[in-house]
Image: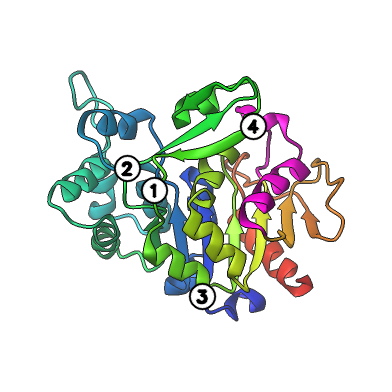
Amino acid sequence: MHYPNLNALSSVVAIGGGHGLGRVMASLNFLESRLTGIVTTTDNGSSTGRIRAQQGGIAWGDIRNCLMQLNDTPSTAAAIFEYRFQGQGELSGHNLGNLIFRALEDLHIRPFESIKLVRNFLRVKANLIPMSELPVHIAARMPTGETVVGEVNIDQLTTTPSELFLLPNVPATDEAVSAVANAQLILLGPGSFFTSIMPPLLTAELAEAIAQSAAHIVFIDNLGAEHSPAANLHLHDRLCWIEQRIQRTVQGVITHPQACIQGLEGKKVIAQTLNDSEVHYRHDRTLLCQYLDELLTAL
């Protein structure tokens, strides 16, 4: 890949969850073991939510999603891991990969080690680390004083929360803290702002590690408006939420041409069309790498 600035980096850390983090990591997959994803584990919807409600444990859905996007070669192993049960009954709608991860938890295998096991199974070279290895939910405190618990409930809000916190207040994974400490570039986003990007930053250890890190920090914006309370926030507002939490300045921003960039003085901003030609709301992998490489020249 002809991205001289990206290829020169010895360690890149991407933080987030869901499809957004997977897309960024798939775009940078050529970095192989120099790339680490720190994955949000607060999901409580769909198959993941049902497993958590009935069996407990951490949220595996976003981790599985990232692994699937990093596995760019069709294989029987990938098909097994991504298989979703159909029909009626208790298994209907469940993803086999989620159930496998949950079984590994029951066998008292550390989530970090479980991911390594599956990475080897799928021949994924990039690293993936859960933000925490303990079960946790995202919670929001509203301007009225009300507390709203759970990713699904927060995404359905129409009013912007005044504060986010983890319930319970779990520690970050040691390996995630170490990855941030050694990173040369930290990427935040894209994804659901309150429920994918912010949760890892709410762990005290990760926030402190980012504050002390010498890495460049870049925010990758969504290509369209969110269907969540974050839709009420301008780009400047979202960066303020991040910077207040990590006590660091976000130096670079990649966004789309229609974004409001008022209040971003002093930051290097690239506002370009990055839409994938087949899935319009996702970032084109080549363009994302191209503009990231360009951004690094200016940082």
| Residue 161 image position (x, y, % from top left) | 62, 29
- Quarter of the image that includes the C terminus: bottom right
N-term-proximal mark, 1 vs 4: 4
The kind of secondary structure element at disc 4 is: loop
Q: What crowding class fits label 2: few (fewer than 14 Cα within 10 Å), some (14-19), or many (20 or more)?
A: some
Secondary structure category for the residue under label 3: helix
Q: Circles 2 and 1: CB distance less than 8 Å?
A: yes
Sequence-earlier tag: 2 or 1? 2
Snapshot colouring: rainbow
- The CA distance from mark 4 to mark 3 is 32 Å
Q: How crowded is mark 1: few (under 14 residues within 10 Å), some or many (20 or more)?
A: some
Residue 270's x, y, as percent? 78, 57
The kind of residue on which mark 4 rests is: Ser
Image quarter of the N terminus:
bottom right
Q: Earlier in the sequence, mark 2 or mark 4?
A: 2
Q: Tell me the CA gap for discs 2 and 1.
A: 8 Å
Q: Give the range drawn in magenta.
A: 222-247
Per the rendering, the mark at residue 162 is: 4
Query: Looking at numbered disc 3 in the image, what kind of residue is underneath it?
Result: Asn
Q: Which of 39 and 209 is in front in this view?
A: 209
> Outermost residue toward the front?
145
Q: Which amino acid does label 2 sit on?
A: Pro
